[in-house]
Amino acid sequence: MTDQTLPRPFGRREFLALGTGAFALAALPIALRRHVSVARRTVPVMGTIAELTVVHRDEAVAQGALEAALAELRWVETTMTRFSPTSDIGRANLGAAREGVVVSAETAKLVERALRWSSAAAGRFDPALGAASELWDVTNRHEPPPADQVARYANRSFWRHVDLSVGSGQGVLRYTDADVHVDLGGIGKGYSIDRAVQALRDRGIEHAIVNLGGDLYALGESPEGGAWRVGIKSPDDERQVARTFEVSNRAVATSGDYERFFRYRGTRYHHLMDPETAAPRRTNVRSVTVLADRCVDAEPCAVSTFGLSQDRALAFARTQLAGAEVITIA
């Protein structure tokens, strides 16, 4: 697929960069509103759509920064996807149950961070439960898999069976359970967004937004000035916005049951697996959104708290991340 330049419909779980509108513009410095170039790119990456907006006085600088940010997203995809047998994670999933598999230092650090979130969340977040996600394959299935196959992966605490050693600029992954299958989908997007934002900053960009399938970082101010205004899509009607808020220099991540799912006999089966049952988590909560300093933390925190009440989700988030904010939609 090639880069797209035209707007497209928003997906079920994506945020909208709404802008602050004319009313907010009136109170902003004139210098911020004049001679500003806005560069936008919309590209497929990491199994979803990346939408990047960069605000800068020099269009060439903005375009160069966009390319650098996109390169970071693609690097993470190539290096850490579970869908390629040649990526770090792909090689580990093929061989780490037999012998140690050498991975890059970046992959090792991200796996280590994911395992720390598993421990903090008492296993509600399990990046080693990839086999259950593959079994359910909710984007292609039309009915649940056989119960005995699901039961095989239930309540196994796979994250405890990932052995990671780090040294000499690289890491080595070993699996002590043959059913372990690492999937960094619950933290990898956030990590890639943070890398993309750093690439923008390194090139002098102070105002931008990087949105990857609904997880995003809002850098500085919007093209109109003031904070970026963000809307969370309604779980029941993708044409509607359930909640809006303003954000600046902040990461935002959402986990919800309306991004990838299928319906069978009146029940929605979504992609967010419950490690205790190895099946889609059953809950009346439709989504949880976490605001934090970095996306690499906001994303696993959102996965960990999906299904919890507002009070419980906020309490957990703030024990892990200073100043975190949580929005739940039931």
Image: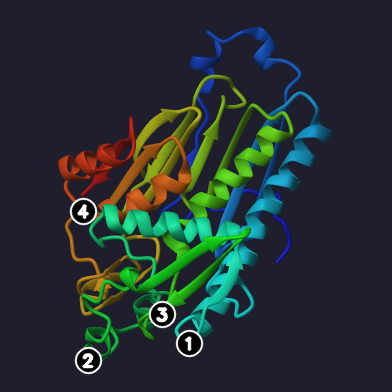
Residue 167 occupies which quadrant of the picture? bottom right
- Labels 4 and 2: the sequence-earlier one: 2
- Labels 1 and 3: the sequence-earlier one: 1
Q: Amino acid at mark 3?
A: Glu
Q: Amino acid at mark 2?
A: Asp
Crowding around mark 2 (Cα neighbors within 10 Å: few <14, some 14 to 19, many 20+) is few
User: Does residue 166 appear to the left or right of 163 in the view shown?
Assistant: right
Q: Are marks 2 and 3 in contact (CB under 8 Å)?
A: no
Q: Which residue is mark 2?
A: 148
Q: State the CA–CA distance, disc 3 to disc 4.
A: 24 Å
Q: State the CA–CA distance, disc 2 to disc 3.
A: 15 Å
Residue 229 in the image: x percent, y percent?
Answer: 46, 30
Q: Residue furthest front?
A: 168
| Residue at figure coordinates x 34%, y 49% from the top left | 301
Q: State the CA–CA distance, disc 1 to disc 4.
A: 40 Å
The circle drawn on residue 285 is 4
User: Does residue 113 appear to the left or right of 197 in the view shown?
Assistant: left
Dot in front, 1 or 3: 1
Q: Amino acid at mark 4?
A: Val
Residue 289 in the image: x percent, y percent?
Answer: 34, 44
Dot in front, 1 or 4: 1
- Labels 1 and 4: the sequence-earlier one: 1
Q: Quadrant of the N terminus?
A: bottom right
Residue 270 in the image: x percent, y percent?
Answer: 32, 68
- For numbered disc 3, what is the local secondary structure? helix
Q: Which residue is mark 1?
A: 98
The circle drawn on residue 134 is 3
Q: State the CA–CA distance, disc 4 to disc 2.
A: 27 Å
